[in-house]
Image: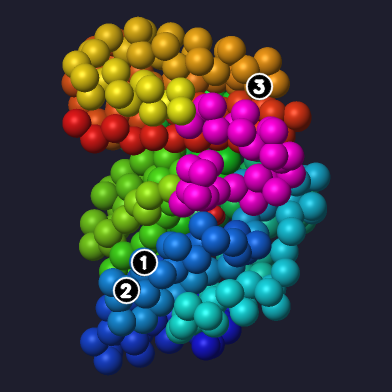
Amino acid sequence: MKIIESVSQASVYVADMRASGKKIGFVPTLGGLHKGHQLLMQRAREENDAIIISIFLNPMQFRKPQFLKYPSDFEQDMRVAEEINVDMIFHPPVAEMFQHVAHIDNFFKFQTAEAAHRQDEHFVIEQQDENGIDNLVRVPSNLVYQLDGKIHPWTFDGAATIVYKLFNILQPESAYFGEKDIQQLAILTKMAETYFPAIKVIGVPTLRDADNLAFSSRNVLLSDEQRRTALSVYHALKHGEHLIRTGESDAAIVLNAIKAIIAAQPLIKIDYIDIVDKRLLKYAKKISDDMILYAAFFLNGIRLTDTLIVEL
Ligand code: PAF
């Protein structure tokens, strides 16, 4: 397994792979590899000749305290990658990916600055913002101001920017992302369609534990009772799915039924629950297309989410 830190070496590596006719699958990560990443890597392994993962803790996506606290352990990540036969880990330092950013704090200033160039329906690439961030991808308002993006739209500009840079460098055939981060997946799918039509963005279904709780590294913080309580959210979403599949097309009725089940759990504080169209992430009063049922909630101060995709 090769470890490459520089953009120029990564480009040479990829060019060699292509010259030998190898199909490259790519799994971008922030590090802290867990079972969810393993699933993405396994899928990439099955469908490609070579797999590259990137481990890059992208400061654009975090507030400073969370960035500093992120559990990074490169040695451990290497062991996980090795088990899955990853061919190359791209592990660049921040200065390699953002050559014009003079200080790490500039990334956190970008989050509070007005996204002046954002458009309603089209991606915009800012050549360089006032903080020195080059090739800054502004996600269109119609995709970003939905679900979690209503709370922190800049996270998605950050993810789109780094994936845009990584796609340019690594030019894979396919890239793998979890359906658990469904808004990110919808945004990156659209971004790839716009700028990288040759790259296939593949959504991998949410990994669930044996009891069906969506896998999250935060689940270890839950007691057995809290875990059972968290599962009631999954059951509420499943009930919503059942209503849709048995003919209910009024989104408000489905949404209220889901909310009622979750609201009956006193330990859960609902952040929000939403039903949106899978492609456009829009709330539609009438359900007629593939839908996403999404719940974000707090349990004992821990924020958890669950997502069900209902393909019609
Ligand atoms: O989902 C993630 O881990 C990150 O948002 C990604 C796609 C690696 C970009 O930094």
User: Could you tell me which secondary element the residue under label 2 belongs to?
Assistant: helix
Front residue of this view, candidates 286 and 140: 286
C-alpha span from label 1 to label 2: 5 Å
Residue 115, given in percent of the width and then of the height, sits at 55, 32
Relative to 257, say whether 311 is above or below: below
C-alpha span from label 1 to label 3: 34 Å
Ligand 1 within 8 A of label 3's CB?
A: no
Residue at 40% x, 77% y: name it.
51
Residue at 79% x, 52% y: name it.
69
C-alpha span from label 3 to label 2: 39 Å
Ligand 1 within 8 A of label 1's CB?
A: no
- Say whether marks 1 and 3 touch (CB < 8 Å): no
Magenta stretch in the rendered image: 207-234
Q: Which residue is mark 3?
A: 268
Answer with mark 1 or mark 3, whichever residue precedes in sequence: 1
- The amino acid type, in three-letter code, at marker 1 is Arg
- Say whether marks 1 and 2 touch (CB < 8 Å): yes
Residue 225, given in percent of the width and then of the height, sits at 69, 33
Single out the mark in the foreground, 1 or 3: 3
Horizontally, residue 150 falls left or right of residue 27, namely right
Residue 78, given in percent of the width and then of the height, sits at 62, 78
Residue at 53% x, 87% y: name it.
2
Q: Which residue is mark 2?
A: 46
Front residue of this view, candidates 230 and 210: 210
- Say whether marks 3 and 2 touch (CB < 8 Å): no
Q: Is residue 124 visible?
A: no
Q: Which label is found at residue 43?
A: 1
